[in-house]
Image (spheres, rainbow, N blue to C red):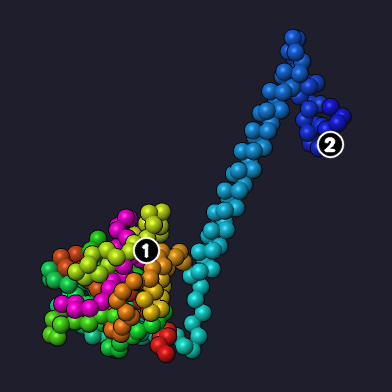
Amino acid sequence: MRAVHNPIAVVAVEFCCSKSDDATWPGRACWLRLQKLAAIRWTFLVAMLIQSAVVCNVGYVQAQTSISYGPEWKSLFNGRDLDGWVKIGNEKWIVEDGAIYGEGITQEYGYLATAKEYTDFDMSLRFKCEADGNSGVYIHTSFEPGTAKVTAGRQIEIDRTIGHHTGGIYGDGKGWIAWPAPELETVIRPNDWNEMLIQVQGRRYITHLNGVKMLDFTYPSPEARSGVIALQLHSGGEGRMRFKDIWIRANDN
């Protein structure tokens, strides 16, 4: 036993051997106690590693949600009125408690679009779903004049229902183009404010939700184009959404 150089092991061996009451083989009880001691130590080690991983992950998420809004970032919403925005369709869009409030009051689609078009940009916003209706942020969008019919554009999905691909990309007339991995479906906060970051770099689209990268997708086609950005209320009259803290950084050359 003196050949063991780990002082903890020496104490453990001497202790368990001194307590052995096995008359046939005194070392057997000692060995069993050592096995139990090793199992306990490994369980403790695994628990500590898991805890460390969780802490590191939380730190990563918090770090990702921190955006430094320099002078190149511009606010798209002043918190008072809908200046700089255009209502498209017949749904209700108002400013309430410092946030844009959208409510589906018909069975049709409704949009609140920027007056300006954008090509490449980074956009951050906060949203809160107050009903189960579907919503989203349309990018590179155009509409048939005088209607709420989308003629071009792609939607970054917003839906508080788990498994409904918030942060994914949906195309009108095309269906789902890309969606988050299954393990990311629970990042959405169904009944609270969420933070979304959308980055458009040519044909590359990157989305973050609550600090977690949900998607990094590059279109094989079509080529990047300009269009308005539009907040959406899905048809069906069930949508009730709030948006605030909307910022954009245009990266057009």
In the image, residue 112 above or below residue 60: below
Figure quadrant of residue 173: bottom left
Q: Is residue 158 magenta?
A: yes
Residue in the image at 22% along x and 78% along y? 152
Residue in the image at 16% along x and 78% along y? 148
Residue in the image at 29% along x and 58% along y? 164
Figure quadrant of residue 139: bottom left
User: How far across and how far down the image is residue 219, in percent?
Assistant: 34, 71
User: How far across and how far down the image is residue 105, in percent?
Assistant: 15, 71
Please name the amino acid that badge 1 sits on.
Asp
In the image, residue 70 above or below residue 7: below
SS state under label 1 = loop
Q: Give the camera-side residue of 193 and 225.
A: 225
Q: Nearest to the eye among marks 2 and 1: give it.
A: 2
Q: Give the camera-side residue of 227 and 47.
A: 227
Q: Which residue is mark 1?
A: 192
User: How far across and how far down the image is residue 131, in percent?
Assistant: 25, 62
Q: Which residue is mark 2?
A: 5
Please name the amino acid that badge 2 sits on.
His
User: How far across and how far down the image is residue 80, in percent?
Assistant: 32, 85
Q: Is residue 77 magenta?
A: no
Magenta stretch bounds: 149-169
Q: Residue furthest front?
A: 220
